[in-house]
């Protein structure tokens, strides 16, 4: 009845007659979207930015059994992304089919789908790319005399003809999102998009050390990775400094194999840096497995630091489940507990063997050891079933690369705490120990002329007219530097001291891309750095108030910290840089200070704009009032 009334109302409003006037019948207002529009919509999930296309194309090349894969980029992938491989190529029909939605050679029937629980094969990548870019394909199988040349734009084939071509496949995609301006406008700066591309390139090339990879950006070769051992590949990608600092991990069981490397404890970083997990040759992010590795390092590295690792887990694909939704890709193991225990035990074992951890218990816990999956070998039946699956063969030959990224927020959680309102809300403690709600300017002229006292080389005690202040030297200094660098970054250029002996800095290709991007902002703060070709840089000058000597380390650390925060969108690049630098350059707790230094510090703190909190919201000092002290003593 209700709905009839609504219907009548609508009819009275004339809406239906309008439809009919426009040539639409009430009955058929629903239309099928044209294919190219449907493809464009679906493409949005798979191809979000140039880096997603890079990942898909590189994986396809690896899947095709290539031994050489070249990536060519122009304008951070906005103008051109091209991948050339020497893999098995495609027949004329396959070449055409490859661009159809749900076209894949990797799944044959629904059984395959369940057996492997979809390892991410959706047959959607090429269809998506063809929907949002101008695509050109050249491909030839070894056995064919002529290859196939296809041009597709907007999901429509513009050209298809036989051509001469090398064995393998070359796919180039030009002008990504040329037909979806909303998306094109959404792309970030070239430097930012380039960073994403480099990240994907590293992940795929790290999964396949046996394949030669190169990457060229605007005509300049950024990576050149000869095929080699796993260790060689890791050092190529993460930098020479790892060379003598990797501990090999290798455990094989019927259930799963783990191999790879962990960095010796000295390579642990203050920021989550080089941590890579691959499952069946696909990069994954897993907070759970990360925890397993961290726990194996317990007691060997500082609590607040992160171990480096590159670990590969191979197991029967039926034990892995992937949520295939492209944006919330996540890996799930049939039995997480087992995997956790194995990872932890394998890493402990490795560390113990290299006598890095003298006496560690690295056996599996009894509960896990008793589990069927671990204690009993695969039955012959089960083994055969799995081994005969064509998919397992390709996996075990490590021919699959699919990257599943989980939205990992864990590492950034503390950024959320930033800018908690300072003052009255900050500590939550009642009156006795307080932080002034509004910054009280304790100019030292107001402070009584008594000497300052340093406690545990960390706290400075300064008496006031109504009690005393307990200043945390590191946090206080962080506030001071934050404001100083902040001012510099926003106009008032900081003085630079020219280095007498310019310092040379060699970085990994990925870090070089990042540093290039930061150079103008660093200059505003007083760092004068110039690119020197081949991923190296020269530090010509440093901010006037920084002691020369460790500028190389300072920049490396800065890059490391910056990477850690780079996915946080709340802050501008400069703001992040200023925060990193302030934290890094602050005098540390534990450092003895002279009377003069303490005086200087306290004075500067109270002339800053917000003396009572650090940029991240920690208190910089606490105030103890005299009347509270009196009350405590029953006076
Ligand atoms: P999927 O990789 O999930 O199968 P894609 O859309 O990425 O889906 O690729 C579709 C098909 O095109 C693949 O299954 C494969 O048969 C073929 N293909 C794609 N890229 C290549 C390549 N570089 N060499 C050979 N065949 C390829
Ligand atoms: Mg693919």
Image (cartoon, rainbow, N blue to C red):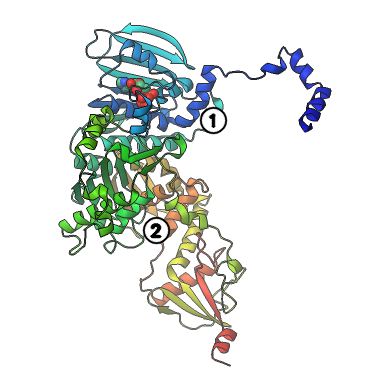
State left or right for residue 158 relative to residue 490: left
Query: Where does the image place residue 45, in percent across and percent down from the top left?
Result: 48, 31
State left or right for residue 128 relative to residue 297: right
Question: In this figure, which residue is indicated by the disc labeled 2?
Answer: 584
The secondary structure type at the circle numbered 2 is helix
- Some atom of ligand 2 lies within 8 Å of the CB belonging to the residue at label 2: no
Q: Quadrant of residue 401?
A: top left
Q: Is residue 154 above or below residue 541?
A: above
Closer to the camera, 293 or 78? 293
Image quarter where the N terminus lies is top right
- Distance from disc 2 to disc 1, alpha carbons, whole Å, reads 35 Å
Image quarter where the C terminus lies is bottom right
In the picture, the disc for residue 606 is none
Task: Give neighbour class at mark 2: few <14, some 14-19, many 20+ (Cα, 10 Å).
Answer: some
Residue positioned 27% across, 38% down in the render? 316
Query: Where does the image place residue 213, in percent across and percent down from the top left?
Result: 26, 30
Closer to the camera, 439 or 329? 329
The secondary structure type at the circle numbered 1 is helix
Closer to the camera, 319 or 4? 4
In the displayed image of the protein, which residue is found farthest to the right? 12
Query: Where does the image place residue 571, in percent across and percent down from the top left?
Result: 51, 48
In the picture, the disc for residue 185 is 1
Residue positioned 30% across, 37% down in the render? 317
């Amino acid at each position: 009845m209700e709905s009839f009334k609504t219907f009548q109302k609508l009819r009275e409003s004339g809406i239906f007659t309008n439809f009919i006037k426009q040539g639409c019948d009430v009955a058929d207002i629903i239309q099928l979207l044209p294919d190219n529009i449907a493809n464009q919509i679906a493409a949005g999930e798979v191809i979000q930015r140039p880096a997603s296309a890079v990942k898909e194309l590189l994986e396809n090349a690896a899947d095709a059994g290539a031994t050489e894969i070249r990536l060519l980029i122009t304008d951070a992938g906005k103008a051109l992304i091209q991948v050339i491989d020497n893999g098995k190529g495609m027949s004329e029909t396959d070449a055409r089919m490859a661009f159809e939605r749900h076209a894949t050679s990797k799944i044959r029937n629904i059984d395959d789908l369940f057996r492997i629980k979809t390892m991410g094969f959706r047959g959607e990548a090429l269809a998506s790319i063809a929907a949002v870019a101008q695509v050109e394909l050249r491909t030839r199988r070894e056995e064919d005399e002529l290859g196939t040349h296809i041009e597709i734009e907007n999901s429509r084939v513009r050209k298809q003809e036989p051509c001469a071509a090398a064995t393998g496949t070359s796919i180039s995609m030009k002008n990504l999102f040329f037909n979806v301006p909303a998306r094109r406008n959404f792309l970030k700066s070239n430097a930012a998009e380039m960073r994403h591309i480099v990240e994907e390139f590293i992940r795929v090339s790290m999964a396949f050390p046996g394949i030669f990879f190169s990457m060229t950006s605007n005509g300049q070769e950024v990576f050149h990775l000869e095929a080699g051992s796993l260790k060689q590949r890791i050092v190529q990608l993460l930098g020479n400094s790892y060379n003598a600092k990797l501990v090999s991990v290798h455990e094989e069981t019927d259930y799963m194999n783990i191999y790879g490397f962990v960095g010796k404890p000295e390579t642990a970083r203050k920021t989550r840096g080089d941590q890579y997990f691959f499952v069946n040759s696909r990069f994954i992010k897993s907070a759970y497995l990360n925890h397993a590795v961290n726990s194996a390092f317990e007691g060997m590295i500082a609590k607040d630091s992160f171990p480096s690792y590159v670990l590969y887990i191979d197991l029967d694909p039926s034990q892995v489940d992937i949520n295939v939704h492209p944006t919330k890709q996540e890996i799930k193991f049939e039995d997480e507990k087992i995997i956790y225990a194995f990872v932890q035990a394998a890493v402990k074992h490795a560390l113990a063997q290299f006598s890095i951890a003298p006496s560690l218990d690295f056996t599996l816990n009894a509960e896990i050891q008793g589990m069927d999956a671990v204690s009993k070998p695969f039955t012959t039946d089960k083994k055969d079933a799995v081994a005969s699956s064509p998919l397992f063969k390709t996996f075990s030959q490590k021919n699959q690369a699919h990257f599943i990224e989980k939205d990992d927020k864990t590492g950034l959680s503390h950024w959320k705490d930033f800018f908690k309102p300072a003052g009255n809300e900050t500590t939550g403690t009642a009156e006795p120990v307080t932080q002034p709600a509004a910054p009280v300017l304790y100019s030292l002229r107001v402070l009584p002329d008594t000497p300052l006292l340093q406690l545990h080389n960390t706290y400075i005690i300064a008496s006031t007219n109504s009690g005393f202040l307990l200043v945390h030297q590191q946090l206080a200094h962080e506030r001071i530097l934050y404001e100083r660098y902040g001012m510099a970054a926003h106009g008032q250029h900081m003085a630079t001291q020219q280095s007498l002996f310019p310092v040379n800095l060699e970085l990994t290709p990925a870090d070089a891309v990042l540093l290039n991007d930061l150079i103008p902002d660093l200059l505003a703060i007083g760092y004068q750095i110039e690119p020197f070709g081949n991923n190296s840089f020269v530090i010509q000058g440093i901010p006037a108030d920084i002691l020369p000597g460790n500028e190389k380390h300072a920049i490396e650390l800065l890059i490391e910290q910056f990477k850690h925060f780079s996915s946080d969108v709340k802050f501008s690049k400069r703001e992040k840089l200023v925060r990193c630098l302030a934290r890094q350059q602050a005098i540390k707790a534990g450092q003895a200070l002279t009377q003069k230094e303490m005086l200087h510090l306290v004075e500067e703190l109270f002339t800053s704009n917000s003396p009572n909190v650090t940029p991240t919201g920690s208190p910089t000092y606490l105030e103890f009032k005299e009347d509270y002290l009196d009350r405590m003593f029953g006076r």
